[in-house]
Image (tube, coloured by chain):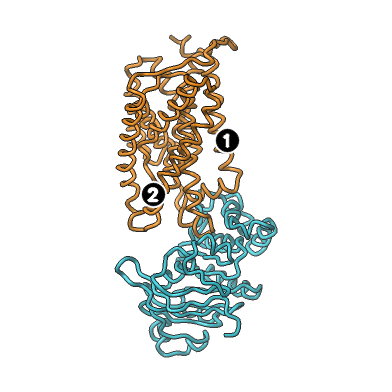
Chain colours: A cyan, B orange
Amino acid sequence: MTDVLLSVHDLSVAYGQVQVLFGVDLAVARGSVTTLIGANGAGKTTLMKTLAGMVAPRSGTVLFQGRDIAHLPSHARVDGGLALIPEGRLVFGGMTVEQNLRLGAIAPSARAGHDEMLAEVYRRFPRLQERRHQRAGLMSGGEQQMLALGRGLMARPRLILMDEPTLGLAPVMVRKVFDTIAELRAAGFTILLAEQNARVALEIADHATLLENGRIAMTGTGAELLAAPAVRRAYLGL
Amino acid sequence: MVDTLLSGQLLFAALVSGSLYALVALGLNLVYGTLRLLNIAHGDLVMIGAYVAFWLFTLWAVPPLVALVLAAVLCAGLGWAVYAGLFRRMLAKPALAKRVEANSLILFYGISVILQNAAALAFTASPRAYRWLDTVITWGGVSMTLNRLLTLGVAAGICFGVLAFLRFHLFGWGLRAVIQRKDAAQVVGVNIERVQLITICAGFAVAGMAGVLVSMTEQITPFMGFPFTIVAFVVIIVGGLGNIGAGVLAGFALGLVETYGIALTSAGYRSILIYGIFVGVLMLRPEGLFTKAVRT
């Protein structure tokens, strides 16, 4: 990989006595979609949370744009251009759609020109504009996922971490989420995607990593993992 | 009887005590909402503010309006000390943070005992009072002392000022985000630690200012704070924990219910009324009267 935006070296994470990640290495090339697949409990969400600064690593480095951010607080990471679209979406249910979006631009680096960014998000997701004055908690799961995505974009990220964005969504919304990911890549964003929906996630991926029991089991292009017998058996049900 | 109930006099009295309840509860609600700390010593900050006003006025004739600022600064400093000294590390460690709500109750109980007895040692337990701006004016048939009018104006002003700040200022949005969903606030990049520190200082400062206002019209003792703690807890439970706007509304509502309830019965029923509302709300609408249940 020539232009690496994020590189993770020998990352280990534990919750108390329970170790979840064991010496994980990962690289994300600028402008790519990198997919992280693995079973429930493999450590995908823990890795995402560690990258976002919500969980502290036990050891290892996280280089983002050449700087070690492994011990920065999460708000400093958002300010530096790293946005997490969290599992379960975590929208502010009692606030309106537009308030949610504006909160997405609370990092100092995102404040300038956040009106243009809001217009941009509304252009990308017209549904959000229609519902801008509605309480976020009253929207459907798919709409909330769009909102979580839009809110992440408001931070003007260079790297978007998406954790299980299709979890619990209807098939039509799953399609829409993956279309959006492709559009975002085309628009120049870099995306690290953790997904249980392995087939679609690998189809869209430039690079892919298989995580098993907290360790990297395989890396390659999306097509390579799609063709790998172990992946086909365990994750694609073939 | 009906005349009394319809009089502007009673309404004014209700609004004055309502505005004080709203103000005291506001500070407690901010601290509970953002830090999940149950500050059982909240009323003792009211006591501290009252003594600040009393001594400044008695010793150096400093007007209570100046004491308002000094009490706010002093109590904000106490908030900073409590946060930096006791809670910062607890809130940073996930294992301790889970228990911080229960532990804070015990810690603040200790702080409350220390504050009350330190005040009793320093100032003796004898009730104190001073007279300032107690001229009676009559306005629209309602007689009121100027200091009560000032209390209403300042208390309501601070309450609505804070509400406006939460509604219109970006920092206020961040604060509401922390109250509503701390994990999500972290995701969007709110500086949680900064919000928590500023909020605990502000919450303590508001209680201190309430104490200055109380001192203008009521007796000051080292143990005057506890009833305010109780009232504040009743108010924020009636309004909905962490729901700042509803808490202010509930403060005024409690002042009205208390004042009119006493007018209809007798002063002996005050506690029954307040605790009755408390228990009633907990049984019938534990999420608070003014909270719309929204699932996220």
Amino acid bearing label 1: Gly
Q: Chain of mark 1?
A: B
Q: Which residue is mark 1?
A: B161
Q: In terms of secondary structure, where does tag 2 sit?
A: helix
Mark nearer the viewer, 1 or 2: 2
Asked if both marks, 1 and 2, belong to the same chain, the answer given is yes
Residue A52 x, y percent position in the rendering:
49, 66
Q: Is residue A136 above or below residue B2?
A: below
Residue A155 x, y percent position in the rendering:
60, 61
Is residue A109 found left or right of B198 in the rendered image? right
Please name the residue shown 63% across and 55% down the image.
A130
Residue A229 x, y percent position in the rendering:
42, 90
Q: Which residue is mark 2?
A: B87
Taking depth in this image into account, of A109 and B279 the one nearest to the observer is: A109
Amino acid bearing label 2: Phe
Residue B239 visible in image: yes
